[in-house]
Amino acid sequence: MRNIIISFIIFIYPAVDCLIAQGELTVPDDYPTIQQAIDAAQPGDTVEIKEGTYKESVAFKEGIILKGAVRDKTILCCDANAGAVISVKDCNEGAITELTLLQTGAEKLPEGEKFLLPVLRLNSSSIKVVRCNIQNGGDNGITIEGNGNCEVSDCNINNNRGSGICVSGEGAEPILKNNRCSENKGNGIYFKDGTNGVAEDNLCDKNSFNGISVVDKWTSPNLKNNQCLENGGSGIYFGEGARGIAQNNICKENEWHGISVADDSSAPELRGNQCLNNRRCGIYYSDGTHITAKDNILKNNGEINYRQLRNTLWEKGFDELEETASRLRREKIEFTNGNCQLNHFYYSLGNGWSGYKPSREEELFGILNQWMRERPKSITPRIVMAKAYVDFAWHARGGQWSRDVPDYAWEIFDEKLKKAWVVLSEAEELEEKDPELYRLFLQAGMGLGKSDREMNFLFERGLEAGKWYFPLYLQRAVGLLPRWGGKPGELEAFARRSAQLNEGREGEMLYAKLAGDAATMYRNLGPDSFKELGFSYPRAKQGHIYILEKYPTAVYYLNTYCLLASIYRDKETAKELFEKIGDNWNRDVWRKEEYFRTHQTWAYSPGTETYRPEPVKEPKSSFEKFMEYLMYFL
């Protein structure tokens, strides 16, 4: 009867389409199930769903409006194995609003279960999804795929086993606005497979992976004014050749980076973002990436990234650099692998010409001179300048044997080191103190042939500036190697004294670090030559155990520990360490894979070879200890 009346109205007065658009079908009053109401609805009709829980998996229809009475009290659900709660395919108009959509039983599914459908599936469609809850999915909360420009706004998408919203496939250009994607096991929002679209004013928080991920070549969304907070990965991630723009986003307190750009083909534009209090870098990007980064604010992040620091230097962001250096000195911050970030800061800036043509040397020193003029009382730019002079000196000298260095290279080497010495001497007069100043004094002093007495004096001054600064100890240790004129046993005595200066576990870790670094320097001279240095393997072993307990991701020290175990023929320990290393061997430790594989083959070879400690020496008397301490300064 209804269809007859509508046909009559259209025949008599075709212009009443607006009246038809106001038709309402109510569930369960007019139809007992939602699918029955959808099947009966015409384009422009509204299917009104009263409060209650409806256990259905439904297919949407072109041009209708599916509306719940009260979002939190109008619930559509189905089992996760049954498919999507709502499937939308080839619909260019329509809306879904004021509903809670969820799947049941997802928590009982085995991890890694595949071929599950999302809670809401939008396939080649352009409808609107407004003010809905999408939750508890066995896969994504919402999957948007194929051609279309759906709009998802003001929705809560949470607790799904996949991502909150996943956009995939060329031609998908959704508008995602004012949504909260929270506590999903994947990403908050995930763009992939060449999609575009806009994500604006969304809150993506506490997701297991990234707040927003953008991956794959030609994927190029516009991310603006989003907040990505407390995610298990990065706030925003670009990878696998992704493009796109990230502007005016806040990425805060994420477990990894604020914004991470991976892979050499990724090339996003990053503008005006705030990356604050992230556990690792504010903005991280790997070698070869071609990002555009402007006007981003990076504060109080757990780690620094040398590429970003170099960009800040070239852009003359002196305030940001000063703030970073001050914080690193004050808080003595380390990377998760135990390396000192203050040393990395100066390496990044003093070696800022690396990756550029050496012809930019003049430009680099021009920027550093400007920095010093604008900050006349700051020690930071002077240390950066001295580091640059030292690096240019060694670059000119090259890595060949002394006898093979040409005269002109020696002249440049000497000239640059003398300039570094002058800058360091001027910086020492400033009120501000920094242990890197003295590490550079020691490095330049080695090249200039300064006396052992003077080097000891500089080391002691460095301890006053920062007893915690391991690079200072390492630099002095290099000067005590026999190749630099060190006496037998002198380096090990220095390691013991250094351990005494740092009580408890910190001291033992320092001893182990010095032993491990010395072993890497002696790897080509054979185990017997290294053993002549006199290090205690049991002590170095225990120190490495402490290091790996404190820094589980310290791959470098895992490798130095393994090298020491191999040198001292501790086969059981070496085999265990080689198993942990796998193929992740460190080139700084082993230099060549062949050397690594030789030791690895020995560790896995038949037979039980156990470390036998050297005969225990009689403890030294107080007088002998005093004389040893005195001789250190002579």
Image (tube, helix red, strand yellow):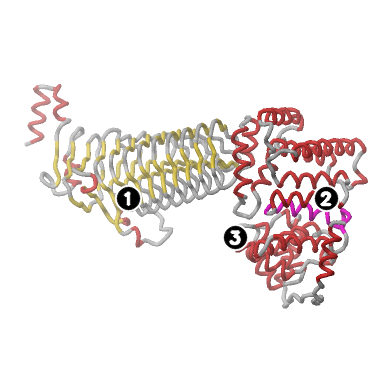
Prevailing secondary structure class for the magenta stretch in the rendered image: helix
**Visible in this render: residue 577?**
yes
Q: Are marks 2 and 3 in contact (CB under 8 Å)?
A: no
Three-letter amino acid code of the residue under disc 3 = Pro
The circle drawn on residue 552 is: 3
Q: Amino acid at mark 1?
A: Gln
Q: Residue at x 82, y 59 (%)?
A: 524
Q: Which sits earlier in the primary sequence, circle 2 or circle 3?
A: 2
Which quadrant: the N terminus? top left
- Near-viewer residue (80 or 580): 580
Q: Provide the secondary structure element on which disc 1 rests.
A: strand
Q: Which residues are magenta?
A: 468-486
Q: Position of residue 420 (x, y in %)?
A: 80, 38
Is residue 187 shown above or below 23?
Answer: below
Q: Secondary structure at mark 2?
A: helix
Residue 455 disc label: 2
- Circle on res. 135: 1
Q: Amino acid at mark 2?
A: Met
Of mark 3 and mark 1, the one earlier in the sequence is 1
Q: Is residue 525 left or right of residue 197?
A: right
Q: Quadrant of residue 151?
A: top left
